[in-house]
Image (cartoon, grey):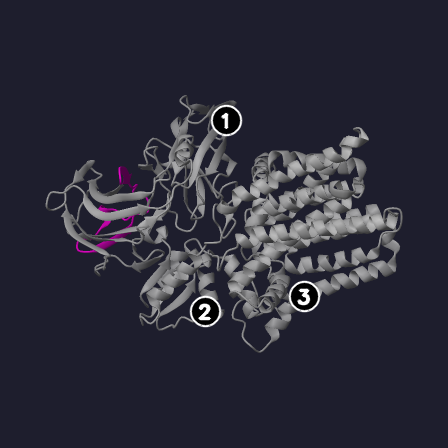
Amino acid sequence: MSTDQQSILTHHVGLLGGIGVFLFSLIVYISTLAPGLVFGDPAEYTFVPYIWGIAHPPGYAFQTILGGLWQRLIPFGSIAWRANLLSAFAGAGIATLVYGSVRALGRRLTGLAGMLPGLLAGMSAATATDMWQHSIHANSHIVSALLATASLFLLLRWWASGQGRSPDPRWLYGFSLVAGLSVTHHPLLVFSFPAYAVFLIAVHPRVLVEWRTLLLMLGFALLGLSIWLYFPLRASLPSPILFGPTNTNTLDGFLNLVLARGLRVNLFHFGWGDQADRLIVFWSLLKLQAAIPLIALMAAGTAWLWVRNWRVGMLYSLFIVVNLAFILNSIQDVMAYLMVPFSALLSLIGVGLIALMELLQRLPARSVRRMQNGLGALLLVLPVLRGALLAPRISLHDFREAERWVDEVYSTFEHGGEGAILLAHWEHLTPLWYAQWVEQHPLDPADVTLVFVASGTANPWLENVEQYIKQSPLYVSGYQRSLADAGYRLRPVGEMLYRVLPAPALEPQNMGVAINRQAGPVEVVGVDLLRTEVAPGERIPLSIAFHALQQTDAIYFPYVMLGDATMLYTTDSHVLSPNWIAGEVIVERYDLRAPLDASPGEYSLRMGIRNLSTGEDVRFSGGASLLELGTIVVTGAIPGGRAALDSVMADIGHQIALVGAAASGNGQRAEAVWQQPLSVHPGDVISLRLTWQALNSPDDNWKVFVHLINGAGQVIAQRDYPPLGGAFPTYLWFPKWVAGQEVRDPYQLVVPVDAAPGEYYIAVGLYGFNTSQRLHFFDRQGNLSGDFFILGSVLVQP
């Protein structure tokens, strides 16, 4: 076979491998694709391109035009599904470009051995958790990662074309176009530009004086940047913009949008003293993307690049380090931004395999090819196995929560003529805007008016309620603790809506199950049980209506029993009976959860009332101490559910487990739960390492609290963050935690300088990001056991 024929065959084999990676990725993503809307930004990225609007800063001009054309060119499926499909193609494109980048670096390997490193890297990218979750719902960040990966691929192809001759500038023109598009898509992609510039000069210094090449590069970059013209042109059209700013045809309005001036506070949030903790965060997140042997290949690949192709090693190193420096020190969308450096790190897996294969070439010639192919094939099992294990946990194939929310709003208000006002946060508003503008299903103001509650003030919910409470019937999306603390009554209406009423709330409430049984100074009017068939760990919304027969100083509080498990709720986020006004009807939500280790079957649901002031149960009229509320059917079972619970330190809401904790301070270290107190002084820093494990996919965005409390439960110091310093929210749009994931979460708690000497305790727990409601803890028998967990005591010395 001639050299030319061998080159053509190698090219065709390589092309076949790229097609294989693309199809593998696409099959994985489409089989787990969300069928419709997803809350929050994903819904915005769905409807903005469709209505040719302008998205939130930085506007995402390229995403908007690409998405709008895509939605119109794909001839089947709903608009929401088409937007999700675009992410699947973008994710498959990233995996394919990773494959191509590794192929460009492994030119010395031929045949199957030359294809295996690229296959390993591409399939590892496809099954990396972060990449996978962003490839199955509409979002702009998967497009960001696609543009960054394309930039690296084009530069590597340019470099490879110059081996032994002058590099082909056509690859640079493609790179320049992608670089221009990158700026119009998201300005944070410019953090990669220093790595690109240094690589260009290192590979071909004469490019600085090749004016024709530079002018053509500039022309292609400007062509990409021309996408920005969408903003001033769209704002100048006579037709109204349904969504987005209308002043982007002015310089100030344009710059405010594309530079995201209002969001800069989220960047470089952490100081030098936090960098060790940020590295712990990075390591925790990296381990979720690939198996440890593949991470070891990343390190081997980096070393091999610096030895064999130091310019490429410098490109990858600068690209990864600079991006990680700003991403890990941000507090919003960290997982989304991390896809950019992760794509490069996943490429290094294939480079590491190239290094191993080159080492094998030192063996006797007869066994080299066989061992190279065997090693590559063996390693390919890891991403394939990972994909098979993660698919049912990551899949959004049955995700319909956003659509259920839309259905709840329309069924509650449409054609009711109530003239209500619904105050809603961002995540809940975007699906409703989609329904109105894409599905052409507007809400009549005679029925309900939507009002966006932005977090721009100290207490936005309370301010909005006080503005609208006297105008119309008022509702909020989700429980809002600040309103209950201010004295308003929140009545559950359905699963996610709450009616806001001033005290006293005298209006009656129709409940699904009427009870009308007295217990002490209160009467249980009835209950609403919105779901009677659940999976293990799933939430069961339960609302209970009370009639305050008279004023009382005692705390009368309900508890329920699901089978043999007792759910004695904490008083957090509830209006307590001493604050009830005689004659009013109080309706409170007391959600319960099916035990994580429950076997399939029917479980009785009963209710009692306890006087928390005396600790005694109160009998109902007729003498019964428990009332039958119905039957809960648990469907399915979680394999190994009991074993998972037996191995954890604390079960939080059957969703997240605390599996380990350690504290250090003043030269001491202790593992939770420690018996001897840590001895510290005022002003000392207590470093904590909490290890979380996802027992289930969390159904809300939970925030961690770490409190230093005194014996009376008063908080004297605290750190409240989404997990990993904001880098790994449990469920903020997406991605969300996947069952089985485990991460180490660092915190630093500062003992106040004015702390009085004495014994204190470190308490940890979780509460809702939007609701401030605490997530309950369960003991090993499935009983509710409180809403915080004590790691151990701290002795503050003078």
Image coords of residue 308 (percent x, y): 80, 37
Q: Amino acid at mark 3?
A: Ile
Q: Quadrant of the C terminus?
A: top left
Q: Amino acid at mark 1?
A: Gly
- Graded by Cα atoms within 10 Å as few (under 14), some (14 to 19) or many (20 or more), the crowding at tag 1 reads many
Give whichever of 250, 704 is nearer the camera.
Answer: 704
Q: Secondary structure at mark 1?
A: strand
Which is more foreground, mark 1 or mark 2?
A: 2
User: Mark 1 touching mark 2, by CB under 8 A?
Assistant: no
Q: Secondary structure at mark 3?
A: helix
Q: Amino acid at mark 2?
A: Gln
Residue on which disc 3 sits = 227
Q: Which residues are magenta?
A: 563-590
> CA–CA distance between discs 3 and 2?
28 Å
Residue 436 — which label? 2
Residue on which disc 1 sits = 665
